[in-house]
Amino acid sequence: MSTPIVQLEDFKKTYQSGDIQVHAVRGVNLTVQAGEFIAVMGASGSGKSTLMNTVGCLDRPSGGRFMLDGVDVSKLDRDQLADLRNQKIGFVFQGFHLLARTSALENCELPMLYARPSKSASAQKARAMKSLEQVGLGQRFDHTPNQLSGGQQQRVAIARALVNDPKLLLADEPTGNLDSQTSIEIMGIFQQLNDAGMTIMMVTHELDVASYAKRMVVMRDGRIVRDEQVGPRHNAAEELGKLTREQAAVNLAP
Ligand code: ADP
Ligand code: MG
């Protein structure tokens, strides 16, 4: 059995909010193996982002244990945690978080500036270009975010998340700002990456979007209340083909 990418054991997170303690996550066990594609669902306030922020090494558990790719995160100081995050994790957010007035290519080069060992400038550019080509945006490498559609901006953000060859891609509501067809396109990219071996954990509140994952985890009040393999999963490439054919049929109708 290979080392799990994520291992959470009785993970707890409590926030201090003035005099009040908020128990955001109340004891979660979760193991994620390489090659999984997981959708995390649950109502607002159920603890999804808290879980993702911990798995993404942006925050530390208040209780229990978190191992990332075999490394016990509780033993690391802030700098070591930041290094581990940069090395192992790619992030995609609802709001894309791209730098304005900065080309797609330069946006993708950013995470490599902090990477160790560092690459030469030309190697960074080549890696960023390869990443943009992977998401189908090679032609638009010199476009700035305001010259790109929302779906294209999210694809740049995915390309950026891939440049340090992460072990795990984390996405918090990646389709939250996108229409349904564009959402399927983004799920198509996730499925393609997952088929090529990338491990993906994605938060979504949309069942449609979750149905492209292989496994579904549902949270309620800081606990996992459901965890199961879903399937047969929807295939984004097939769905898009169907949509295009329907569109063509509508256009051809007298
Ligand atoms: P979700 O992403 O499922 O909406 P969150 O993980 O954001 O849920 O939040 C879980 C609970 O923790 C909520 O009650 C939220 O108000 C609380 N919470 C989240 N972050 C903080 C924080 N930094 N300080 C205090 N409470 C927080
Ligand atoms: Mg959230």
Image (cartoon, rainbow, N blue to C red):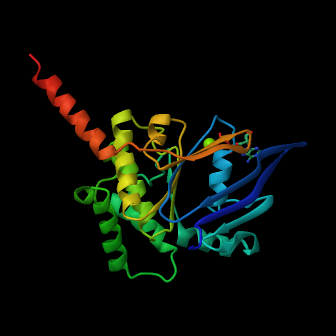
Ligand 1 occupies quarter = top right
Residue at 38 percent of width and 47 percent of height = 186
- Residue 80 appears at what percent x and percent y? 66, 75
Decide if residue 225 is on the left or right side of residue 114: right
- Residue 219 appears at what percent x and percent y? 66, 42
Residue at 37 percent of width and 64 percent of height = 196
Residue at 47 percent of width and 45 percent of height = 174
Decide if residue 24 is on the left or right side of residue 144: right
Q: Is residue 189 visible?
A: yes
Q: Nearer the viewer, residue 26 or 165?
A: 26
- Residue 102 appears at what percent x and percent y? 38, 57
Write down the quadrant of residue 177 in the picture.
top left
Decide if residue 33 is on the left or right side of residue 220: left
Q: Nearer the viewer, residue 252 or 31?
A: 31
Residue 117 vs 102, above or below: the answer is below
- Residue 119 appears at what percent x and percent y? 42, 81
